[in-house]
Amino acid sequence: MIAGPPEVAAEGLQQYVEAGFTGFTFNNTLYKTPDQIAAVGEVLRLL
Amino acid sequence: MQKPWFSFHLPSYTFPDAPPGKMFERTVEQARTAEACGFSQVTVMDHLYQIPNVGEVDEPMLEGYSVVSALARETRTGRLGTWVGGGGEQRTLRIAAKHADITHWFPLPMSDLQRKTDLLASYCEESGREASTIERALGSPVIVTRNTAEADAQLARFPRNGAST
């Protein structure tokens, strides 16, 4: 498991994207506030 | 390579700072925020009781299909589709091969994910379906934080998972 700011998270997801996984789910048990959700949105823009 | 998409998943309707009467209001707030941040899907579980590792069995819940319908009214860009969640190799992947638009697995080591991908392809072949018509999605293998301190705090919850920042 990798944890970090959007740049780190995007880098961590890259290998899965390259392996053909197109979707990723993020749970509201971990991302509760608008800012936490927005941080995930930043990852998407980096991919 | 296809541009990836994100789904905001709502397994829980428990908001410590909101009473049960405000559950749906808060759920809508999260769904709208996710939509505004570029998520292309909002998903729910069809469980009537909360499951272990998410919360307590007696937590207040909302019925999944009603929530999906109501969120469709409250958001603008969501799409409907059939997910088959789980990577069980004897039964679940066969069901996914027949019925899923999207199959959703836990974030396992790449070798396990590749084995499941190969199995899914073979089950698709048995069903006369082109495997590429099923999208493969994962529970996120990364945790997104704003800084390293938050990252360390989150990883402390997964002490035996080979976690790293």
Image (spheres, grey):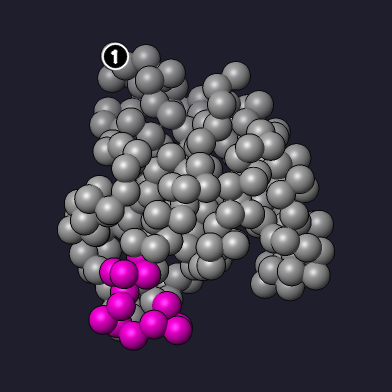
From this view, report whether residue A27 is shown above or below residue B156. Answer: above
- Residue B110, visible in the rendered structure: no
The residue positioned 21% from the left and 64% from the top of the image is B63
> Is B113 situated left or right of B51 in this image?
right
* Type of amino acid under label 1: Gly
Task: Give the quadrant of residue B148.
Answer: bottom right
Quick one: B45 or B145, which is closer to the camera?
Answer: B145
Quick one: B30 or B64, which is closer to the camera?
Answer: B30
> Is A33 situated left or right of B70 in this image?
right
Task: Give the quadrant of residue B2.
Answer: top right
Quick one: A23 or B53, which is closer to the camera?
Answer: A23
Say if the magenta span includes residue B43. no
Quick one: A28 or B39, which is closer to the camera?
Answer: B39
> Is B41 situated left or right of A27 in this image?
left
Coordinates of residue B107 in the picture (x, y in percent) = 58, 47
| Residue highlighted by disc 1 | B128
Which chain does the numbered disc 1 sit on?
A: B
Residue segment shown in magenta: B15-27
From this view, report whether residue B33 is shown above or below residue B157. Answer: above
Coordinates of residue A3 in the picture (x, y in percent) = 73, 57
The residue positioned 24% from the left and 59% from the top of the image is B67
Residue neighbourhood size for the residue with mark 1, other residues' Cα within 10 Å, grouped as few (<14), some (14–19), many (≥20):
few
Coordinates of residue B101 in the picture (x, y in percent) = 33, 31
The residue positioned 38% from the left and 34% from the top of the image is B102
From this view, report whether residue B115 is shown above or below residue B157. Answer: above
- Residue B14, visible in the rendered structure: yes
Task: State the SS at label 1.
Answer: loop
The residue positioned 58% from the left and 54% from the top of the image is A38
Say if the magenta span includes residue B18. yes
